[in-house]
């Protein structure tokens, strides 16, 4: 799963449609599609809540947010969708605050936002997600308040990790044909976006369902040829054992691919990884990071890690903690293990909740230390940076390696969305302070 840290995005009011997004970058992309569909269907005073099911905490936050939204907006229509709504629609349809529940397939269709024959919204529209064979493609002109744009290249997952419910929320793996990807990227570049992010559930599984079965690496190579004006491409989470030779060639030789590689790691102990039913072992990740640094010396790694997976003892946890150092992991997304009903892991011997919290805290502390060490090493170096925000004489953005940079300057010639050259001078919190 292309997991991002679980958080509630700020509500965005546009044409009387409000969108609240939880979870991953794929949800961020789909929320923009939903907003456009709801607007096109003529809805007003409507709040769309796009939920996540990666942890029970994410679902709790969604329900809590829905209650608060209704208190603050008593006259609004509330539509709930996303992975949590797909897997367990009843928990939302039973809420008095909710007017309609849409599945992950339905939320991408205009007719789902139209009233039924009775003139009212049908309360629950959730189909069998496993029956969906294609990924709906929607041209998006932009993302409100953002300078980088997300492009969905894949959806669903063919793997069945023992802790995960996402395949039951997203269905089996489905790839977007290259022609549709090219059209979307050209539209976004024409709208002024400088950076594109490939997003999906398991993007390194891309292409296996398409006629010619192109790999992700082959597809990126063709993309760069077909869209030479694309200068900055990022990948969301990748599986280290699914990286094909063409993708290795792109990582090594294509500067337009940003050198920030986020790994779907989950654990650093072999027995835990086997019990998770992951496709890699510890050494596979170590080898991946070593090769990436060898062919792309400026490569920086992020990783998703689960703390306190069932049966995890102190020695197993230490292996996971140590891999942060062994692989020079810089950006960590740490998730305390969350028991998901119906999964094989839920039937395994569970780790005490207090211990899970302690281990998650230790991993986050290790991640903070790793990030600070990386930032300190960047002092004195020069990087390109995408400008994300300018306010009161402060310029903020991220480098190619996704490091946050702050520049104290009121330079009027710089605009949001510009790609500029900066010299990094010091560290301030979790950011670098730079100069033009």
Image (cartoon, rainbow, N blue to C red):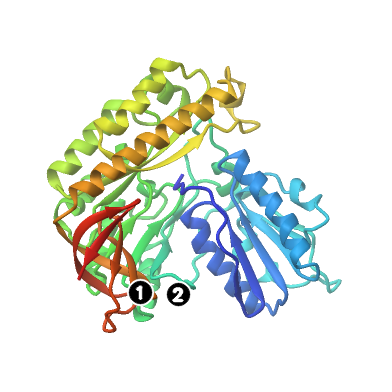
Instruction: Say what secondary structure mark 2 lies in.
Output: loop
Q: Is residue 342 left or right of residue 3?
A: right
- In front of the other: 8 or 424: 424
Q: Is residue 85 above or below residue 414?
A: above
Could you tell me which residue is drawn at 80 percent across and 58 percent down?
97
Q: Position of residue 403 (x, y in %)?
A: 29, 55
Q: Residues within 10 Å of mark 2 (few under 14, many from 20)?
A: many
Instruction: Say what secondary structure mark 1 lies in.
Output: loop
Q: Position of residue 56 (x, y in %)?
A: 62, 39
Q: In this view, does 141 lie above or below 403?
A: below
Q: Is residue 308 left or right of residue 412?
A: right
Quadrant of the rendered image containing residue 165:
top right
Q: Position of residue 193 (x, y in %)?
A: 35, 74
Residue 27 visible, this angle: yes
Residue 401 disc label: none
Could you tell me which residue is drawn at 41 percent across and 37 percent down?
364
Q: Is residue 132 left or right of residue 230?
A: right
């Amino acid at each position: 799963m292309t997991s991002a840290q679980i958080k509630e995005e700020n509500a965005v009011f546009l044409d009387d449609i409000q969108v609240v997004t939880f979870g991953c970058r794929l949800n961020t992309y789909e929320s923009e599609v939903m907003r456009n569909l709801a607007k096109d269907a003529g809805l007003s005073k409507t709040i769309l809540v796009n939920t996540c099911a990666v942890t029970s905490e994410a679902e709790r936050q969604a329900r809590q947010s829905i209650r608060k939204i209704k208190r603050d907006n008593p006259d609004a229509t509330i539509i709930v969708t996303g992975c949590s709504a797909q897997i367990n629609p009843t928990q939302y349809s039973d809420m008095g605050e909710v007017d309609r529940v849409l599945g992950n397939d339905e939320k991408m269709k205009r007719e789902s936002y139209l009233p039924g024959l009775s003139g009212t919204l049908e309360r629950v529209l959730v189909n069998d997600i496993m029956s969906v064979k294609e990924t709906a493609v929607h041209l998006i002109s932009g993302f409100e308040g953002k300078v980088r744009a997300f492009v969905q290249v894949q959806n669903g997952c063919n793997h069945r990790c023992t802790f995960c419910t996402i395949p039951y929320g997203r269905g089996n793996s489905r790839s977007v044909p290259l022609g549709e990807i090219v059209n979307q990227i050209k539209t976004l570049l024409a709208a002024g976006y400088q950076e594109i992010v490939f997003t999906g559930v398991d993007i390194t599984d891309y292409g296996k369902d398409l006629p010619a079965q192109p790999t992700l690496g082959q597809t990126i190579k063709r993309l760069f040829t077909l869209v030479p004006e694309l200068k900055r491409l990022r990948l969301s989470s990748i599986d280290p054992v699914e990286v094909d030779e063409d993708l290795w060639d792109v990582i090594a030789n294509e500067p337009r691919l940003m050198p920030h590689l986020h790994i779907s790691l989950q654990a650093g102990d072999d027995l835990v990884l086997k019990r998770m039913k992951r496709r890699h072992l510890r050494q596979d990740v170590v080898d991946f990071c070593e090769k990436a640094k060898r062919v792309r010396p400026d490569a920086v790694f992020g990783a998703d890690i689960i703390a306190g997976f069932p049966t995890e003892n102190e020695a197993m946890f230490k292996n996971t903690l140590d891999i942060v150092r062994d692989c020079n992991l810089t950006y960590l997304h740490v998730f305390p293990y969350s028991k998901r009903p119906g999964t094989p892991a839920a039937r395994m011997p569970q780790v005490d909740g207090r211990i899970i919290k302690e281990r998650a805290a230790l991993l986050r502390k290790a991640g903070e230390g790793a990030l600070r060490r990386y930032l300190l090493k960047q002092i004195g170096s020069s990087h390109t940076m995408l400008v994300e925000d300018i306010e009161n004489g402060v310029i903020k953005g991220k480098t190619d390696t996704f490091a946050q940079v702050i520049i104290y300057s009121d330079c009027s010639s710089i605009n949001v969305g510009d790609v500029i050259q900066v010299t990094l001078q010091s560290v301030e919190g979790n950011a670098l302070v730079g100069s033009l």
